[in-house]
Image: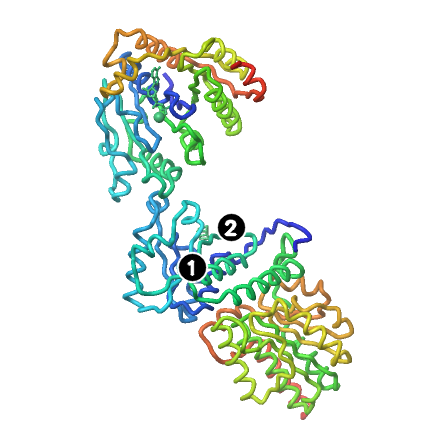
Amino acid sequence: MAEKDISIIHPRPSSIVAALYTLRDLNVDVAILHGPPGCSFKHARLLEEDGIHVVTTALDENGFVFGGREELSTLLGKVNEMFNPKLIGIVGTCVSMIIGEELSEPVKDANLDVPVICVEVHAGYPNNTKGVLIALESACDAGVITDEELERQKVLLKEATNVEKRHGAASKEYLVPSRGDLKYKVAEKIINYLKEGKKCLTIMNAKKETGYMFADITVAINEVAEQLGVSDNVINMANVDDTLGLPRVRHHAISIMNDFREKGIEIHEIIGGMDEYPVTGEKVSELIAEKYSDFDFAVITGVPHAIPMDNLQNMDVISVTNGPRQVHPLKDMGHSNVIVEIDLHPKTLGVSNIVESEFGATMREVVKDMQKTEEA
Amino acid sequence: MEQKRIAIYGKGGIGKSSTASNVAAACADEGYKVMIIGCDPKSDSSITLLGGKRIPTILDLLRQKIDVKEEDIVFDGYKGVKCVEVGGPEPGIGCAGRGIIVAIQRLKKVCKSIDDMDLIIYDVPGDIVCGGFVAPIRKGLVNEAYILTSGEYMPLYAANNICKGLAKIDTPLSGIICNSRSVTREEEIVRKFSEEIGSKLMAFIPKEQIVQDCERDGFSVLEKAPDSSVAGVYRELAHAIMSNDSSVLPSSLEDERLRELTR
Ligand SMILES: Nc1ncnc2c1ncn2[C@@H]1O[C@H](COP(=O)(O)OP(=O)(O)O)[C@@H](O)[C@H]1O
Ligand code: SF4
Ligand SMILES: [Mg+2]
């Protein structure tokens, strides 16, 4: 586990938010935040785009002092009428947890015919994966997921935490955000490599729904290779196993695979499920050692810092992330270029098809321009 | 004269509320303008100044979302002593500490008469379990702290801890008051303790049945038994507090020394 305990000072998504996203993956129809009205506002809004209703008990100063049992049970009744949900989640906040609110009591008071997952979480955990864990444990208690799935997820979470500590957002006390390298420069470089007949590995190692956009980079590279007549020089890996993970996560894998198929893109190696991004690294390493050690360059998208560099030493590694704070750690790992897809996440919510990425679009344009100048 | 804003700390049940209300009554007898602010969710600080009646607490009214005014929460008791009770949430629910903070902020905002007082006594709960319970001090509302203790080990232990706490939040101690539980050499023990932490013994209040009898009837000793000897002690204490102008940042004793003192 932690080789070092560092005190990280850059703000980062909280466990409350992590719990909300987990509830979404469990396909709850409504998530209730039991706490102050502004808590987790930005992510609550995003999640609405993803089709779930997020509401708050909006505890005020009085609520802080007297508790909000009635507010919560009333709100449960209200959302039941308004949205007719099949599954509800309640998420604690710092406020409700500090004053010792008991989430299950208002659930009893409301006496609904709908299963409710009560997640006793606050924002004070250093690793926000704790929020995922608590949400999953609560879901297991509520009979929404099996013990086996819980155990599987626990392993993934532990690895996800380790990945962040090794090379991710938890690797340094403070990480300067960066916009990464210029997209057209890197696009030019990739296109030139392909032209020169260099062999390319695309490795999509995406976290859940972010795959809808990272997949577009795989698509763009394959399109460019096709135009240049070097399709055979590209091998695609992606974590799109649709038999693994929570229901919503499997659905993402199915949708993305469908799109790949429709666009005629072959995924040569499926490296895991869409929630397995923290553990795919080893598999990728083995595959490279076995079959692809003579490749010239690799484009890793999604969570690139989870892929170990051991067997990539002889390749030029280009990575695409959506985390501005991830740029420096990736360069430190030895990636020659790092591209940031700014604001990727919001664009991947509420979709079930691959969405165009800026980097993908740039490659498509640059290849056109280059061909035009050649013709001229 | 400069307004005195005092808080009396000490182990739960040691006699803070009864001492506070008797001192308040004694000061009112002397013609001082006095306010007593009960900060314990039990709301029992002012009851003996109000003939045994309970007043609505600030938090009772806030709970009903009432836009509280001074006259809703400040009540005249014995000889015009202004009585306020902060109140609290139901035991075991919500956050009493936050309640004190919110109530005191509200009181400060709506209570104009607070500025005219000669003496304001904050009657605080015995156990300082969280930040809210020291809000009167932290928010600068209290400028003198007193500690009430008997000569027994546990109350002294608590007193010693309070000294540590006061030093930590940079609040000077104005004196120690001994409320007797009739243990041997009690006055000597508490006097020694007071000196060793760098403070002084303000008064020795004997344990007298009449204190409890008056309380049961809903009155202070000063009102119900003004000629009793213990009423005289409260008068002296009141006088000592009103004329006290020295305070120190207290030190605290090692547990070993504390045990030795009480042996
Ligand atoms: N000097 C005294 N003699 C007799 N009884 C006392 C004396 N001081 C306090 N008491 C009684 O001790 C009990 C606890 O006192 P109280 O003021 O409520 O303590 P605190 O406010 O410190 O919790 C009360 O019943 C009170 O009447
Ligand atoms: S402090 Fe906690 S409860 Fe308050 S807004 Fe932030 S995350 Fe929410
Ligand atoms: Mg009391």
**Do the dots labelled 2 and 1 sit on one chain?**
yes
The residue located at (34%, 68%) in the rendering is A85
- In the rendered structure, which disc, 2 or 1, sits on the residue that comes first in sequence? 1
Q: Judge the density around disc 2: few (<14), some (14-19), many (≥20) Cα neighbours within 10 Å.
A: some
User: Toward which corner of the image does residue A166 lie, by quadrant?
Assistant: bottom right
Asked if the beta carbon under badge 2 is closer than 8 A to the nearest atom of ligand 2, the reply is yes
Q: In which quarter of the image is the N terminus of chain A?
A: bottom right
The answer to whether A267 appears left or right of B114 in the picture is right
The answer to whether A122 appears left or right of A221 in the picture is left
The answer to whether A316 appears left or right of B179 in the picture is right
Q: Quadrant of the C terminus of chain A?
A: bottom right
Which residue is label 2 attached to?
A124
Q: Residue lying furthest front in this view?
A: A147
User: Toward which corner of the image does residue A44 lie, by quadrant?
Assistant: bottom left
The residue located at (53%, 14%) in the rendering is B263
Helix, strand or loop at disc 2?
A: loop
Q: Residue A291's x, y, as percent?
A: 74, 81
Image position of A256 with respect to A69: above or below: below
Which residue is label 1 attached to?
A41
* Nearer to us in this view, A85 or B140: A85
Q: Which amino acid does label 2 sit on?
A: Gly
Q: Residue A203's x, y, as percent?
A: 65, 76
